Amino acid sequence: MIESAADLDTFLTFVRNAPRVAIDTEADSLHCYREKLCLVQVELPNLEGPRLIDPLMGYTLAPFYEALREKPLVLHGADYDLRLFKRSADFVPHSLFDTMIAARLLGRREFSLAALVRNEFGVEMPKGSQKANWARRPLTEQMLAYARNDTRYLFALSDRLGAELQAKGRWVWFAQSCQRLLDAVATTEGEKNREESWRLAGSGTLRGRAAALLRELWWWRDAEAALADRPPFHVLRNEEMLSIAKAIDAGEKLPSWRHVKGARLRRLEIAVQKAMDLAPSEWPARPRGKFARSTAEMEAQVNALKQKRDLAAQELDLDPSLIAARATLEGIAYRAEAPESLLMPWQRELLGV
């Protein structure tokens, strides 16, 4: 455990001399309103065993990020970890090997870290701490063992998957995919503005007053979660809010929950009444579509692209969505965006666009 600035300073000597660095992180997003970085697991080729950096001990991690800046990093499913680094320290690495991206580009259908370690090395990784509260101290022995395992196999896994990518001629695909992730993280904007934050999956089916109800429910839930310092889903789940908005719009009564009572319930009732009192001119406007109205010619192009995508995916033994999601194919066919902005070069080559 690295629990002080002095510990970190000693450790950074090894980091600076390492040719690459394997990393994982733990946060407390399942236990509080605004998540924070709680642990950084680091594995180095020139040091036996992982080191666990504890950001909650009060010392700055700025020297650590600076030492990492030009290092090739190895992570699994790096999107969450990199966005956590970006939010907490405005740090984006220079180079990335994401073992999950590698596995998917090789056609692996099971690509969790546990599944890959099991299938590649015959090792069962212990579970049990995935939903633990990583902000608590001291960490239990079970949590420490879990944390250490998250980086233990990353170098060996990246070496094996990297060799297979090279052998199959897919290394360029992989490099482009990792770079696209880095670029996306680097250009990540701040939190959604208040007016758009409530548009969750499924909200596009709501119209008029039902949409206004969902918006007020979302804002109420966010305020309650912040007040209690709990994740929003602990207050109400997204699907519950969608159901409530539809039900109240249809004239049904507000449901009841054991944990929504007293002052919280009164604030909910006020939010619902506020939405009900809005004039139609104050209801949320539908988001402007990115696509032009479809024509028979456009639909034919979407289907032709989908057929080409599915054939390529079958020949390469890949998930078709890796080549292009349907929304991406529609964006190309409807001329909403140029293919260069929607697809990586290897994807455009497979689709011929």
Image (tube, grey):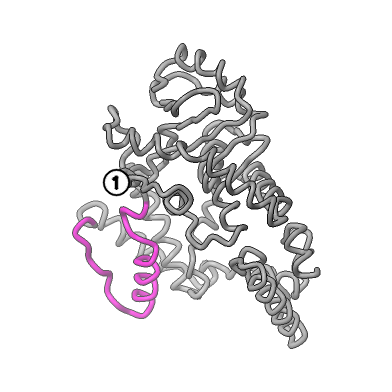
Query: Measuring 47% from the left and 37% from the top, which residue is drawn there?
Result: 151
In the displayed structure, 16 sits above or below 127; it is: above
- Quarter location, residue 46: top right
Q: Looking at this view, is 117 or 54 the one in front?
A: 117
> Is 154 on the left or on the right of 264, as rendered?
right
Query: Measuring 39% from the left and 23% from the top, which residue is drawn there?
Result: 1
Q: Residue 30 location in percent, x, y?
A: 35, 46
Circle 1 residue? 128
Q: Residue 307 location in percent, x, y?
A: 69, 79
How many discs appear? 1
| Disc 1: CA contacts within 10 A as few (<14), some (14-19) or many (>=20) | few
Q: Looking at this view, is 50 or 133 the one in front?
A: 50
> Is 320 on the left or on the right of 352, as rendered?
left
Query: Measuring 37% from the left and 65% from the top, which residue is drawn there?
Result: 241
Magenta stretch containing residue 223, yes or no?
no
In the displayed structure, 207 sits above or below 69; it is: below
Quadrant housing the C terminus: bottom right
- Element at badge 1? loop
Magenta stretch containing residue 258, yes or no?
yes
Q: Amino acid at mark 1?
A: Gly
Q: Which residues are magenta?
A: 232-259
Outermost residue, top side: 6
In the displayed structure, 34 sits above or below 115; it is: above
Q: Residue 77 location in percent, x, y?
A: 52, 48
> Is 342 on the left or on the right of 24, as rendered?
right
Q: Residue 282 location in percent, x, y?
A: 52, 67
- Quarter location, residue 33: top left
Outermost residue, bottom side: 296
